[in-house]
């Protein structure tokens, strides 16, 4: 993936957008962690942690040999620690492949994890996007336990979700498993408060994409002139999902030069500047939609675990058709 080409495509499109992954440089990763800890309206993190804490031994499949633990969108690796601890308890040593878009942040976290586990854990960090991570799995021998925790998977377009599940199904054997956390909440007020909380803590994360564009490519877009809006769109169709739209609404008409990309963009007054690609981000699912999504990607939903509030489903997929 060429970052400049991706940014140009988004900024020249109608409507204009910045890819959701662009917010996650080192600063964005720090903002993200702060949102998870301090945004009291953000239910996903708390629900996911609860499910993993209560069900980790059941979630991890009973494997005769130590799997390669692949962590898609690893972030600070906090939630994956439960998988690491449980696998080490049984197998004594495992190989851990964290995949993250921010190379600097990934390197720092990998060093920290290495200090904690020492020789019991072989870490092979994979800096790059999800496609790069999946490509690394091609030809890798042995059993793979692939985790995709947090909101990384559901922040992709539906088309990319299906495409990447197909890529994963092609590198998975019958012994491999894919564990994905998915949002099954359907309360409009809860969802909109979670993604644009009334306290404003999450705003720094969303604005980081624009601030990063200013820092790295010399633009001068004033985030104060973009009023953030989030809206939940419900959809019952099995082959689709519900989702959230997130944008900054321009409060003035302004022309912005972006010398590092060699382009100029015009923002009209009241124009919506989206902070994600596709029609929405942070998809919300029914269980039927999750099953359909898996089948579209060549995978089968073996089992899922939910929290008491029914906010999140931690889902286990395999390539077995009769699981």
Image (spheres, rainbow, N blue to C red):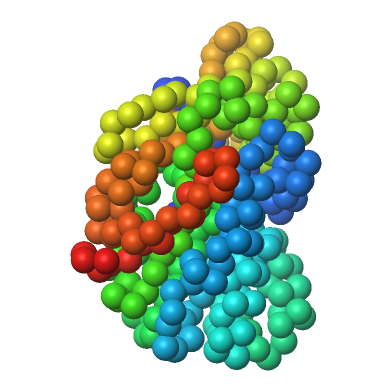
Question: In the rendered view, would you say 263 is above or below 320?
Answer: above
Residue 89 position in % (x across, y down): 61, 85
The quadrant of the rendering that contains the C terminus is bottom left
- Measured as percent of width and height from the top left, residue 35 is found at 72, 42
* Residue 281 appears in view: no
The answer to whether residue 48 of the structure is visible from this angle is yes
- Residue 289 shown left or right of residue 29 in the figure: left
Residue at position x 71%, y 74% in the image = 113
Q: Position of residue 287 (x, y in %)?
A: 37, 43
Instruction: Please count the marks in the image.
Output: 0
Residue drawn 76% across the image and 46% down it: 37
Instruction: Residue at 51% x, 50% y: name it.
Output: 306
- Which residue is situated farthest in the left direction here? 321
Q: Is residue 250 left or right of residue 112?
A: left
Viewer-side residue, 282 vs 323: 323
Place of residue 208 in the rendered image (x, y in percent of width and height, measured from the top left): 69, 38
Q: Quadrant of residue 95?
A: bottom right
Q: Is residue 134 above or below residue 38?
A: below
Task: Looking at the picture, tell me which residue is in the foreground, 291 or 168.
Answer: 291
Q: Looking at the rendering, in which quadrant would you find the N terminus?
A: bottom left
Q: Residue furthest front?
A: 308
Residue beneath the point at 32% across and 72% down:
172
The picture quadrant where one finds residue 64 is bottom left
């Amino acid at each position: 993936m060429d970052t400049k080409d991706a940014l140009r495509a988004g900024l020249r499109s109608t409507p204009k957008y910045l890819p959701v992954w662009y917010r996650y440089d080192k600063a964005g990763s720090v903002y993200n962690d702060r949102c998870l800890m301090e945004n009291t309206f953000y239910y996903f993190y708390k629900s996911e942690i609860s499910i993993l804490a209560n069900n980790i031994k059941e979630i991890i499949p009973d494997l005769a040999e130590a799997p390669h633990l692949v962590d898609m969108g690893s972030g600070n690796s906090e939630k994956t620690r439960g998988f690491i601890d449980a696998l080490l308890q049984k197998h004594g040593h495992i190989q851990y492949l964290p995949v993250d878009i921010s190379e600097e942040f990934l390197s720092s976290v990998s060093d920290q994890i290495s200090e904690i586990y020492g020789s019991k854990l072989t870490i092979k960090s994979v800096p790059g996007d999800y496609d790069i991570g999946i490509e690394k799995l091609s030809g890798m021998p042995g059993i793979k336990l692939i985790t995709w925790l947090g909101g990384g998977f559901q922040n992709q377009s539906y088309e990319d979700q299906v495409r990447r599940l197909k890529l994963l199904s092609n590198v998975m054997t019958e012994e491999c498993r894919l564990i994905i956390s998915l949002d099954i909440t359907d309360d409009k007020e809860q969802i909109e408060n979670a993604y644009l909380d009334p306290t404003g803590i999450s705003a720094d994360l969303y604005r980081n994409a624009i601030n990063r564009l200013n820092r790295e490519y010399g633009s001068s877009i004033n985030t104060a002139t973009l009023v953030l809006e989030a809206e939940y769109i419900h959809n019952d169709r099995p082959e689709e999902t519900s989702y959230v739209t997130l944008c900054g609404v321009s409060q003035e008409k302004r022309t912005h030069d972006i010398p590092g990309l060699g382009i100029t963009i015009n923002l009209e007054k009241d124009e919506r500047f989206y902070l994600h690609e596709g029609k929405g981000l942070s998809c919300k699912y029914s269980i039927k939609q999750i099953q359909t999504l898996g089948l579209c990607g060549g995978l089968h939903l073996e089992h899922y675990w939910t929290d008491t509030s029914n906010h999140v489903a931690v889902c286990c997929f395999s390539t077995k058709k009769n699981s």
